Amino acid sequence: MDRKYLRENKNSFNIVKSSRIYAKVTGYDDAIFVRDLLIEHDWNLDEIPNLIKSNDCYLVLAVIEEKLHMIGKYAHEPDSETIEKITRNFKRNPNGSMYGLNITRVFDTFVIKKQIAGDDYIFGYYDNLEDAQFVRNFLLDNEWDVNRFGDIEFDDETGRYKVVSVIDDNVYVLGTFSTDRIDLNEVYRGFLAELSKHRYGLSRRPHLDLLKDKIPELEEMFQVEARDKNWSFEDIDENKPVLNQVIFNLTPFQQSVFDVISKDTAFDEIKRALIRYQSKNFENKIQKNIDELIGMGLVEKTGDDTYSKTNL
């Protein structure tokens, strides 16, 4: 039969019958095997097993968006949990890309975008990849229906819990926790405080741009008021932009350090909060930025190894 039903691409083979693509496989030998498997099952994808033994190897197969894929090879028979995990991961990132399906990065913001019926839809904006991947994964598993989100959802990738809110059809992650015993009112207050700081130039949160003018509406929606232990939003005069300008001119890493510091924040706490930025001379870099913030009058040293925002 040789190459019957095989259509060679640059780095893969499509298996095609009557103009329909039934499978996409990387290697030639694997493509031959999958083609013969399809013929054996009369091209019925519903009858293809998700695990099959070929010679001395176990092959994991998955039908995703009406196409058959070979997604794993094992010398020993994998258990059902392993099969479920690699199938789930393949659905989320079939091309092995940096962020996976439907996530793009625009400067420091991760955007979830999907084309539906020829139109592009935005599902959310995020300041970190973990939140973006969590929301994307949930949507992939739930037919892109934002109404299926609860207030608290479990992230199967990180083993942590996310507080979620859908606002104007965009999905926002309000916080991440190690337990599901969460005081939602405190989370809502904290989220609104971050939004308020972004609005008044006390913090840079570009992923919250769409909500800057909705604070009163969100306070009513969440039934809480924006509250922060370092800033009184009622006292902020938007006509006095000096502080705003200072903070907006911070470098991204200065801003990250500034945001972490509250009252008597220990250096180790700052380091743990910024661990995702870890690189060579990580501690020296943090200390350098703290010293620069002290020089700007935004931060003060309150102990041998503790820092606070100044009362500006």
Image (spheres, rainbow, N blue to C red):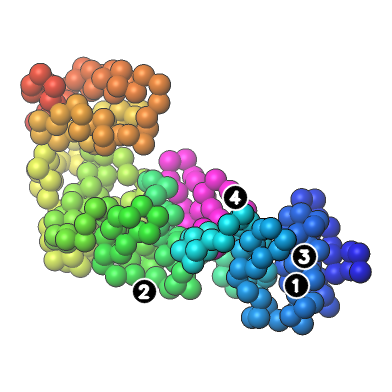
Marks 1/3 in contact by CB < 8 Å: the verdict is yes
- Observer-side mark, 4 or 2, equals 4
Whole-percent x, y for residue 133 in the image: 44, 54
Indicate the amino acid at tag 4: Gly
Is residue 252 visible in this depiction of the protein? no
CA distance for labels 3 and 2: 39 Å
State which tag comes first along the sequence, 4 or 3.
3
Q: Secondary structure at mark 3?
A: helix
Indicate the amino acid at tag 1: Leu
Q: Secondary structure at mark 2?
A: helix
Is residue 276 toward the left or the right of residue 195 in the image? right
Whole-percent x, y for residue 56 in the image: 69, 58
Residue at the spot 59% in from the left edge and 50% down from the top edge: 96
CA distance for labels 1 and 4: 25 Å
Marks 4/3 in contact by CB < 8 Å: the verdict is no
Sort mark 2 into few (<14), some (14-19) or many (20+) by Cα contacts within 10 Å. Answer: few
As drawn, the residue found furthest toward the right would be 1
| Residue 297 is a magenta residue | no
Is residue 305 visible in this depiction of the protein? yes
Is residue 252 toward the left or the right of residue 174 in the image? right
State which tag comes first along the sequence, 1 or 2.
1
Please provide the residue range marked out in magenta. 87-112
Residue at the spot 40% in from the left edge and 26% down from the top edge: 279
Q: Which residue is mark 4?
A: 96
Q: Which mark is residue 33?
A: 3
Q: Which residue is mark 2?
A: 148
**Can you say which quadrant of the picture contains the N terminus?**
bottom right
The front one of 261 and 215 is: 261
